[in-house]
Amino acid sequence: MKEKFQRFMTGRYGVDDLSKFLLGVAVVLCVLSLFLRSGLLNALVFLALIVLYFRIFSRNFSARSHENSVFLKYKNRVTGFWTGQINLLKQRKDYHIYTCPQCKQKIRIPRGKGKIEITCPKCRNKFIKKS
């Protein structure tokens, strides 16, 4: 049985990040529909599963990979922003994050060094701040 399924799947697109996301959306909507008893949520679950199976069993590699790359572009924008914010919060204990008044470049300065002159690595502007 496993070999038959493997032969069937050869030449098909398979699972990618967009498919995993659609599966997650379908599961979340399914759980919500259990509590809210909405026909619209059931229809959205059904639609997400249809799109999911269509993408997995599709033989059009170029279209599916293009859809996945567009999805990844938007996903990386969102996750990249939040990853940067989390890193800034983690570094607040050990570093001050200053912005250059001239070019707005962010500069990381260690805490506890007193009043220091900071040179911007981008525009070479010098300014004095307290660390």
Image (cartoon, rainbow, N blue to C red):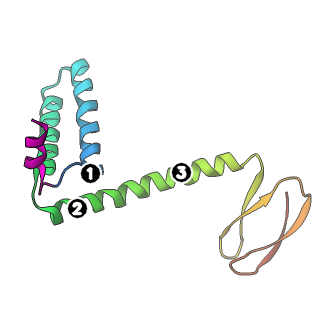
What amino acid type is highlighted by mark number 3?
Thr
The residue range painted magenta reads 1-12
Location of the N terminus by quadrant is top left
Query: At x 30% / y 50%, what residue is drawn?
Result: 17
Q: Helix, strand or loop at disc 2?
A: helix
| Quadrant position of residue 71 | bottom left
Q: Is residue 11 magenta?
A: yes
Residue 70 drawn above or below residue 126: above
Of the residues tagged 3 and 2, which is closer to the observer?
2
**Between marks 3 and 2, how big is the CA–CA gap?**
25 Å
Kindly check if marks 2 and 1 are in contact, taking CB atoms under 8 A apart as contact.
yes
Label 2 sits on residue: 65
Q: Position of residue 100 (x, y in %)?
A: 71, 70
Q: Is residue 98 magenta?
A: no
First in sequence, mark 1 or 3: give its number. Answer: 1
Query: At x 29% / y 62%, what residue is drawn?
Result: 69
Label 1 sits on residue: 16
Question: Which of the labelled discs sits on residue 122, or is there none?
Answer: none
Label 3 sits on residue: 83
Q: Outermost residue, right direction?
A: 114
Location of the C terminus by quadrant is bottom right
Depth order, front residue of 123/75: 75
Q: Outermost residue, bottom direction?
A: 124
**Between marks 2 and 1, how big is the CA–CA gap?**
9 Å
Q: Helix, strand or loop at disc 1?
A: loop
